[in-house]
Image: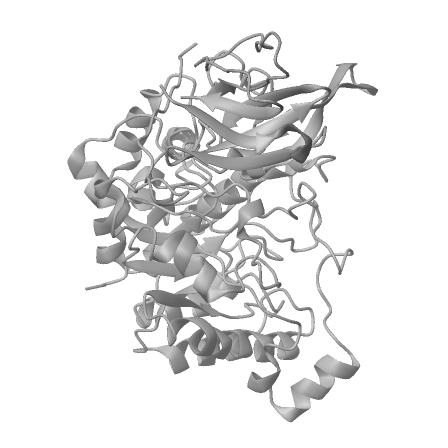
Amino acid sequence: MNMTVLDRKPDQSSQNDTPAQSHMGFIDCDVHPYVKGPNDFDPFLSKRWLEHKQTIGGRPRQGLAKTSMYPRMSPGAGMRMDSWPKTGGHPGSDLPLMQEQLLDLFDVAYGLLAPLVGGGPGERNVEFGAAMATAANEWQLAHWCDPDPRLLGAIQVNIEHTEAAIAEIEKRAGDRRFAQVNVPPRGLEPLGRRRYWPILEACAANNFPVSLHLGGTSGHASTGGGWPSFYHEEHPSYVQTMQTLVTSLVCEGVFEQIPNLKIVLVEGGFAWLPALCWRLDKHWKRLKAEVPHLKRSPSEYVHDHIWVTTQPIEEPERPQDMLATLEWIGPDRVMFSTDYPHWDQDDPRYAFKIPLPDDWKRKIYRDNAKALYNLD
Amino acid sequence: MTRHVVAKAEEIQAGTCKIVTVKGREIGIFKVGDDFYGLINRCPHQGAPLCRGEIVSRLVAPTPGDYRLTRPGEMIRCPWHCWEYDIRTGQSLCDPNSVHARAFDVAVEPGKTLVEGPFVAESVQVTVEESYLVVTM
């Protein structure tokens, strides 16, 4: 076993350590803003949908409406315990605290928002879902992107309402305050199915990468074999979800159909990707006749179209294995993410348990996201 | 090395922690039973403010379904990633071979002998000063 001893020189004037220079100005590909209260979206709903919300309410795809499917550690509710604002409210709801603990502390160049609030994308009443998704987009601009232009929004859509989703994407096209389109990774069907192609085409046509952020629920069990018993068991099921997405997008021929589609996998880690590609490549050689629309090996599609974010980062027992994994995926396809303010968020100073080559570091912390999202 | 009076002994009740600052470094002073222990307020895993976490027991299960709560109030659980450390030693019990929080010796000085922790990464000298807690670093 390796002995891990981190001996850092503390900032004498503050409880926070001084960030190492190399991580300053990084781009955070997963930041969670939260509502201050249940009525935050109301100003952005039409009278028709506001009344619906107030008198009928949401129809989520999970049975436990007031909690998560797998409640996190308590107290803390699955949040960094030091991220609860002293002024009250939920972690992630207070911009000044987010600035203190993340944006200013690391001089974050850009923070890519992943709002997991409002329920629009997973709403069963798809028209209400589309209205809530639109409200979530307006809310991001008003509460986050305009007050702090470092924060870039993610367009929310309900992919079960194709026309509304495409209209929302087209409405936001060219608005640089939005960086990408968020699609729930756990859908009613695997994302590569043809019914979703028009939405994916709209994303690509309007220069928006598609970001797939774990978890949530579609109503299906979160593993192929049924519902997990423990949160510890649910957490690695994110890997299965990501594997299903990658496999579906590749095998359905989505990347042949939409050659400029860019997919970002968020909060699934990444060390599982090489082994999945080895398996896909092996069987592609044998089973080509079933999927003749695949002109190239699955791993080539993956490398050309898929980006991964780092959190929750793998911590291999042999730290050097991380380097081999990154090398296989390609240091040009990996982007750093914290997942602030969730309990399993990663700190950019200490997430990697082995030093990265300088050029990899620049790519992973900054340059890859800059290029993908066309940022200054 | 300098001796720092950090608190009165009666300020810290058993099962609680007080965070003090010594030479710019935050240290959590814990009382477990009748004894006092100090840990640097920084998790060796990713740098979280360790001592702001929950003080918990160590739950073990020799077999599935056979749960035993041990070491009541002797563990500190990191407020970020839930790594658990033995307050008295700084020893991590998630991965005892690889991660170790830095422990400082804290003692009550009633004018008699010092109480030494069973294991400390950095020992501190303590001197008699009525019933004040004194950290030396």
> In the image shown, does B50 or A291 lie closer to the viewer?
B50
Q: Residue, x 58% and y 86% (percent of image)? A: A43
In this view, the residue farthest toward the bottom is A47
The residue sitting at the right extreme is: B66
Q: Could you tell me residue B37's position as x and y percent? A: 58, 21
Q: Which residue corresponds to the image point at 52% horizontal and 41% vertical from the top-left?
A: A344
Indicate the position of residue A199 as horizontal and vertical percent values.
45, 69
**Left or right, A252 with reference to A24:** right
A118 sits left or right of A16 in the view: right
On screen, B79 above or below A161? Answer: above
- Colour scheme shown: one colour
**Toward the viewer: B66 or A170?**
B66
From the viewer's side, name the closer residue of A349 and B56. Answer: B56
Q: How many marks?
A: 0
Residue extending furthest toward the left: A359
On the image, the x and y values in percent for residue B123 come to 46, 12
The quarter of the rendered structure image containing the N terminus of chain A is top left
Displayed quadrant of residue A222: top right
Kindly tell me whether residue B101 is visible in this rendering: no
Nearer-the-camera pick, A80 or A211:
A80
Q: Is residue A8 visible?
A: yes
Quarter of the image where the C terminus of chain A is located: bottom left
Q: Residue at x 70, y 43 (%)?
A: A74
Q: Is A266 positioned to the left or the right of A332 in the image?
A: right
Vertical relation: A191 (above or below) B51? below
Residue A318 location (% of width, % of height): 38, 16
| Identity of the residue drawn at 67% across and 86% down | A50
- The quarter of the picture where residue A10 lies is top left
Q: In this picture, is B76 found above or below A128?
A: above
